[in-house]
Amino acid sequence: MTAIDMGFRDDINDHGAARTGGPFADPAQLHSLILASVGQAIIAADLDRKIFFWNRTAEELFGWTAEEVIGKTSTDVFLHGESVQRASEVLGTIARNGSWSGDLDAIRRDGSRLWVFATTCAVRDANGELVAYASSAIDISEGVKARRTLEATSHRLAEAQRIAHLGSFEVNVGGGDVIWSDEMYRIMGIELGLAFDPQAFLAAVHQDDVEGLTTVWTNSVLTGASFDHAFRIVRPDGTERSVLARVVSDIDDAGRVTKLSGTVADQTEWVEAEATRRVAESRFEIGFEQSAIGAAIADLDGIPRRVNQALRDLLGRTDAELTGQRWTAYSHPDDVPLGEAVLANLAAGNETYQDERRYIRPDGSTVWAATNVAIVKDNRVLQYAFVQLKDITQRKEMEAESSHRALHDSLTGLPNRTLLTDRLTHGLANSKRRGSRMGVIFLDVDQFKVVNDSLGHTSGDGLLSEAANRIEHAIRPGDTVARFGGDEFVVVCDDVTAFEAEHIAQRVLRAFVRPWLIKGQEIHVTASLGIALSNDASTPESLLRDSDTAMYRAKELGRGRIEVFDETMSVKASRRLSISSALHHALERDELSVHYQPVIDLATREMVSVEALLRWQSASLGDVTPADFIPVAEETGLIVPIGAWLLEVATRQLVEWQQLQTALDHGRLLSLAVNLSVRQMLSPDITDRIARVLAKSGMRSDDLCLELTESVFMQDADYFGRTLNELKALGVSLAIDDFGTGYSSLSYLRRFPVDSVKIDRAFVDGLETDSNDTALVQAIVAMARALGLSITAEGVETAQQMVCLTELGVPRAQGFFLARPMPPEHITRLIKTRELLGPAAPTDVAALR
C-alpha cells in the first residue's frame, strides 16, 4: 500500500463497510469493502496519530469496536511496553523511508498481551503530501512464545553447560560440518563463534594424548561405537585442561555413520582434586605407618580398626591383640574411667579429646601416653575417630622424680621439711578427729659438726645416711621420720601416749649407742632427743618448736639423752633466743670482759698462774653467766671470734703483770691458761692466729697453756693430732681440762703431746666422803707422774679438800676456797702485795675473792 484516496472515509459505515449504492458501483467503495474484509488488521491514523479507520479484523484482534477506537491514538488503545516508546521512532523511520515493519508488543481490551507483526506506510495525496498513516498487523503471539521458549531452553541449556563445564558438539561425518556449544569454546579457551574444525580440535589435544583419542574417534566413525575417553587439551595461552569426551553415533538405514555427537566435560578441577586426594592419602598412609607416634583409626564406639607399627611397639602388642579390642583390655585399671570419658565427651558433641593415661604391656610394665582423639567427618557426618598415643613415660618418670625431690631429702631419701609439714597437718587433723595425740620427736646428732669438719663432708654425709637408716629401723612401721636439716631429724608418731612416745625415743637413742665406722675409723656419736605431744591448740609449727626446745634441753643436760617438753622449757628457749641475739653484738658493744682465777702452789700458797675466763654484762639482759652464753656461742660459732678476742686481751694483760713482777723482783713469773673449744680447734688458721697473738703481745710461748676438753681428743685423731703438734711447735703447753670425765683419756695421753692434766671438780668434791674418788685421784697422780705430766686440781671448795690434795701429792689447785675469778686490777693488787692465798692467807685477801 503506497497511497490511499482519502475520499473513501465518508463512504465507510460504522463496521468498516461502504455506505453508497450497489455493489462495486464505485471503485472507492470496492476498496473500502476489501480493506474491511481482509484477514489482517487494517488501521489508519491521521498525522496526529488519531485512528480514523479500524477494520473488522482489527476489532477481532484487539477486542475494540471501530466506534470505540475512532479518534483515539494507537498508544491509547493497543500499544504496550517498549512499543509505546518506539512509536515516535517508528514514525520517524516512515517519514524517512516511507514504511516500517517489525514486531510490536500489544495489549487487548481485556488486558491480555499479544505480539503482532506490523507494517506501517505513509499515505500521500495526489500532490505527494503526507496526509495519513496506514498499518496492517497480524497476530504472531504463538510464534513469539515458541521462540522465547526455545530461547529460554537454549539459555538454560547453555547456563547448565557453563555451570557444569560441559560442552556439546555435533559433527557431520560426510560434510565435516561442526556445531559447538558456547561452553565448548570456553573449555577450549577460544573466542566464541570462531571457526574450529575437527582437525583444529585435534591439534589442541595434548601431544601425549593424540594417539589414544584418534584411535577411539576413528573406531567410532567406522563402526558407530560410542565411547568415553579422557584426555588433555592445551589452550592457546598454554594452560592445560583435563576433559572427558562422551560420543554417540547416528547411523542411517545403510548402516553408515552420518553424525557424531556428544559432550566434553571439563574435569580439570576434579582431576586436580583427585590427584591432591591421592597425594594426601599417600602421605597419610606413609605418615600413619611410619609415624614415630602411635596411631589408630577407631570406630565411633572407640574400638580400633587399624593401628600402626609405632602403637604396636608402644604397647608391646600385635595387630590382632589391638584391633577389634576395647582400650580397657590393656588400660591401667586406675585409668579405665578416662577411656569411658572419651566416649562421653564425644557423645556430648565435642570433636576432640585429650588426656594422659597409663597402659599395661604384656610383661606387666606400665607405659604413660598422651592420648589425643579427633573425630573425622565427611559432609558433617561422623565417620571415625583418629587416635594418637605419644609415649611420655620418661617425662612422667622425671616429673615423679622431680616431685619426689621437691618433697624428699636428696641425701637420705627421707621426707623433707615441706612433706613433714604436710604430714603434721594431716596427722593433727586426724588426731583431733579421733581424739588421740600425736608425738613429735626432734633429734640432733651430737658433735656432728666435729665429725663433719674433721673427717670431711663425705664422711659427714655417710654418718647422716646411716643415722637415717638407724632411726627408720627403730621407729614403728606407721611412723614418719624426716630430715629437718643439717644433722637434725624429726619423727612423727600418730596416736601415741606419752609413755609410748618415750619408748620410741628410747629405741632411737639406743640405736645410736653402737659404734659408727666412718672411713675405717670407729667413732662414738650420740643423739639428743626432745619430745612434744599434741593438744587441741597444737599446730605443726608449735610441735616442731616445742620438740626442738626439749632437744636443746637434752643437750644442756649433757647430750645423749631424752627430754619431754614442758612449759618451763619454753621460758628457757625464749631466754636462749634472747642470749643468741644479744651475743651477736656483745663484742661491738664492748660488753665482754675477762676475769682471771689464780692457780695456787699448794706447798707455798703462791699464785703461779691464772686462768682467763669470759664474763658478759649485757645492756639488755644484764649479767649473763658463762653457763648460759658459752653453749650458745659454741652452737652459733661466735666462740671463734670471741675466743680470739679473749686470747689477745689475756696475753697483753699477762705481759703487763710479768713486767710488774720483774720490776718488783718476783722470782717466779705468772703463766696464763686459756680454754680452746672444739669449734676453735677446727678453725683452719688456729695455729697461725695464736702465733700472731703471741708475736703481737710479746708474750713468751712457754708461758701460755692451752686447755682442751677430752671431747677434742675423741674426734678425728689424725686431724687433731696434726693441729696439736703444730701448736706444740709454737712452744706453748697443752693441758687436758676436766680430766677423768671422758672415755679413753689414758690412750690419748700417750698419743698426743700433752703437758699437763686438770683433775675434774667432780672427783675433788668426793675427796671428803667417797673413798673411790680418793683412789681415783691417787691413780691419776701416779699416772701423770709416770708420764711426766704436771697436775692441777679444779674446784677446791673446802680446807679439807685442799689438805687431801696436798697429802695425795697434787702440786697445784684452783677453786673458790683459794680464790674466785676476779677482774685484772685485783690480780695486780695481789702481785704488788705478794699476798699468799689459802687458809693461812690474810683476811684482806679473802675480801678479794
Image: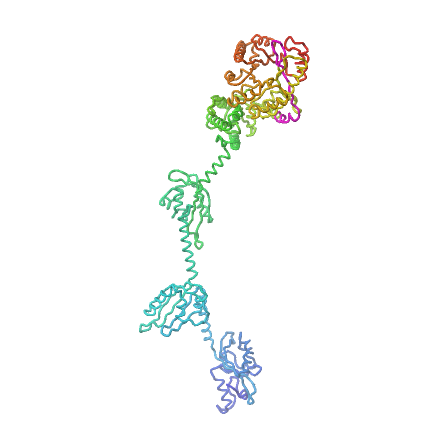
Can residue 291 be spotted in the picture? yes
In this view, 711 is above or below 84: above
For the C terminus, give its image quadrant.
Answer: top right
Magenta span includes 605: yes
The image shows residue 533 at horizontal and vertical percentages of: 53, 25
Observer-nearest of 233 and 317:
233
The image shows residue 341 at horizontal and vertical percentages of: 45, 44
The structure's colour scheme is rainbow
Observer-nearest of 73 and 731:
731
> Does 482 sit left or right of 626 as displayed?
left
Observer-nearest of 271 and 736:
736
Query: How many numbered marks does the figure carry?
Result: 0
Magenta span includes 602: yes
In this view, 303 is above or below 219: above
Q: What stretch is highlighted in magenta?
A: 579-608
Which residue reaches farthest left?
Answer: 254
The image shows residue 694 at horizontal and vertical percentages of: 61, 21
Observer-nearest of 585 and 332:
585
Can residue 573 be spotted in the picture? no
Which residue reaches farthest bottom?
Answer: 25
Residue 601 picture quarter: top right
The image shows residue 380 at horizontal and vertical percentages of: 45, 54
